[in-house]
Each structure stands twice: as structure tokens, then as C-alpha cells.
Amino acid sequence: MSEFLFVYGTLRRGQPLHPHLEPPRARFVGEGRIVGRLFDLGDYPGATPDPKRFSTVRGEVHELFDPQETLLVLDDIEGFDAKRPERSLFERRETEVALDAGGSVRAWVYFYRQTLIEATEIPDGDFVRYSAE
């Protein structure tokens, strides 16, 4: 099980759900990006994989000190049910994260699973910058 988590929306530093990733649960490692597309879903963003690998999503990597415990809390927040992923709002999967400081890590990320009919794509893949505009 990965000890790292990549967050791109309301779990990032300065965002409303970030307290779930403060010590003693986790430690900020650095900023980075994953291959994917990012959408504005209203109150929060949702990332989806990009099989064509044209787009990236910006975010942060956090090291989880007790991954099993913290991921249970986050699964509930993100609407992910490991026993019934097909019914989940988001799906937690491991993916490669390119770190801005160099190198990469494998980290958990929550990908959006529902339809995107009402969603607006965030062109630069950065929710924090987009929501500040």
C-alpha cells in the first residue's frame, strides 16, 4: 500500500478539507502533477485519467503516517466504497506523480467516476489557481 497521497482540490493546503492531512496524519512532501484532466464540478473539482496523455493535473503530495486509517476517513469524504467502486462518486487508485522538485512517486489519487455533462474543464489543471480567479 502506498504511503503517499496526491491531492488536487479541496484537500490541498489552504482549502477547506486540508485539516484532514495535517500532522499527525500526514506531512506535505511537495507539489507535482499527474496525467489527467480536471473538471469544475461546482463545490469541488474532479480529475479523470487522460489515456491520450495530453493533459496534466496540478496538486500536492502528502506522506501518510497511518495510510490505512487516514484513507478510511478520506474514502468516506470522497464517496469511495472499495466494496462497490461502481457506485462510488470517486475511485481511489495508485498513479505516478511527477514532483516539481524532480523525481516521481507512486501515490493514491481520487479519480471522478460520474458523468461530466454539467462539468467545465479547468484548462491548466490547477484548481487552486482556477478557484481564485
Image: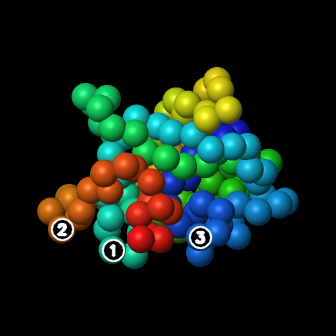
Number of other residues with Cα within 10 Å of mark 1, as a class: few under 14, some 14 to 19, many 20 or more: few
Q: Quickly name the residue at label 2.
A: 118
Q: Where is residue 108 in the image (x, y as percent from the top left)?
A: 56, 42
Mark 2: amino acid: Glu
The answer to whether residue 109 is above or below residue 14 is above
- Identity of the residue drawn at 47% across and 61% down: 129
SS at mark 2 in the image: loop
Structural distance between the alpha carbons of marks 1 and 3: 15 Å
Image quadrant for the C terminus?
A: bottom left
Circles 2 and 1 in contact, beta carbons < 8 Å: yes
Say which amino acid is labelled 1.
Gly
Label 1: element kind: loop
Residue closest to the eye, 120 or 88: 120
| Disc 2/disc 1 C-alpha distance (Å) | 9 Å
Q: How crowded is mark 3: few (under 14 residues within 10 Å), some or many (20 or more)?
A: few
Question: Which residue corresponds to mark 1?
Answer: 42
**Residue toward you, 122 or 92:** 122
Front position in the image: 123 or 4: 123
Give the numbered dot on residue 15.
Answer: 3
- Left or right: residue 103 versus residue 46 is right
29 relative position to 50: left or right: right
Q: Identify the mark nearer the N-term, 3 or 2.
A: 3
The reply to whether the C-beta atoms of the residues labelled 1 and 3 are less than 8 Å apart is no
Question: What residue is rendered at 37% in x and 49% in y?
Answer: 124
Which of the 4 quarters of the picture holds residue 49? top left
Instruction: Give how far across and how far down residue 15 sits, in percent.
Output: 59, 70
Decide: is 99 above or below 31. Answer: above
Whether residue 45 is visible = yes
Give whichever of 87, 60 is nearer the camera.
60
